[in-house]
Amino acid sequence: MNSPTILYLGNKHGIKPLTMTVLNQTKNISFLKVIACIAMLVSSFFYPGTTIQAQVVPHNLLPSKPNPPKLVNDYADLLTPQEESQLERKLVAYDDSTSNQILIVTVKTMRGYEADQYATEIGHYWGVGGQGKYDNGVVILVSDGTEENGKRRYFIATGYGLEGALPAITTNAIAEEFLVPNLKGNNYFAAFDETTNAVFRAAAGEYKAPDNYRKRKSKGTGGGLAGFVVLAIIIFIISRNNRGGGGGFMSRRG
């Protein structure tokens, strides 16, 4: 027999009841989906203005996979052919020696999607860093803004296998220290050259976000530890449920 359960949600407009029906038979309900719903409800309490976007970018809106495969894909024409070749040789050599793949992609538009969504889905769909999955790979994505009202955007997305060495605080620090200043000065080769060097160091455990960066980012954050745990659960569930397809982007060499 079905039993009604009342959940109360707090928000700036007061406390409102939310009625749910809990079924005795839950075989058709994924446990992860239940956890995700609970996490989203709790998250709305800690972060009332937070919206969770789990939308996957359709593959026909992503850049086409290059054939033959390559690691530097300058669709926005920000690099000279010589600069592109130099970065390609550098990243292929790094892939050969470490089995970590770093992909550089420049585009003129992200088709209305957020930079993190677009970069991550490229990693999934192209299979950067692993055979059939986004594993030991990094995607450095830059939009030149020519088709988005001049708004230049960027994101460094990390595959599952490198999340320990390249957490978000590290990739954000790398972007702010090396990528953004060079992009602002239209020094595109330096932007990618210095950023990839920093990623090399971070993957080897030789680069950490500066202390002042950590302190700066920690100011003004609220909600407590529980809120961060909830968001981590949501992100984990969404990322596991939204993995893209596609084979390995580049075969392992040597």
Image (cartoon, helix red, strand yellow):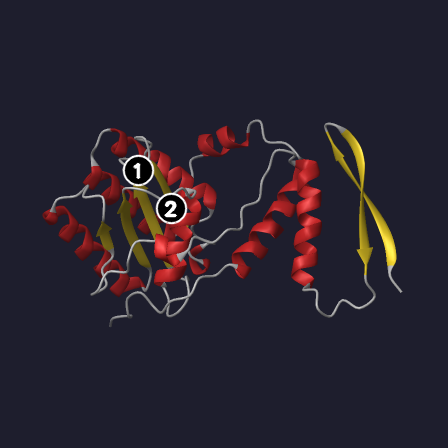
- The answer to whether residue 204 of the structure is visible from this angle is no
SS at mark 1 in the image: helix
Going 25% across and 65% down the picture, which residue do you hit?
96
Residue 107 image position (x, y, % from top left): 28, 45
Question: Mark 2, residues whose alpha carbon is within 10 Å: few (<14), some, or many (≥20)?
Answer: many
Residue 1 image position (x, y, % from top left): 89, 65
Whether 122 is drawn above or below 224: the answer is: below
For badge 1, the amino acid type reads Leu
- The answer to whether residue 160 of the structure is visible from this angle is yes
Q: Do the residues labelled 1 and 2 touch (CB within 8 Å)?
A: yes
Name the residue tied to disc 1.
179
Q: In which quarter of the image is residue 41?
A: top right
Residue 9 image position (x, y, % from top left): 77, 39
Residue 147 image position (x, y, % from top left): 29, 37
Q: How many labels does the image show?
A: 2
For badge 2, the amino acid type reads Ile
Going 81% across and 58% down the picture, which residue do you hit?
22
Q: Earlier in the sequence, mark 1 or mark 2?
A: 2
Name the residue tied to disc 2.
156
SS at mark 2 in the image: strand
Going 53% across and 50% down the picture, which residue do you hit?
54
Going 62% across and 42% down the picture, which residue do you hit?
228
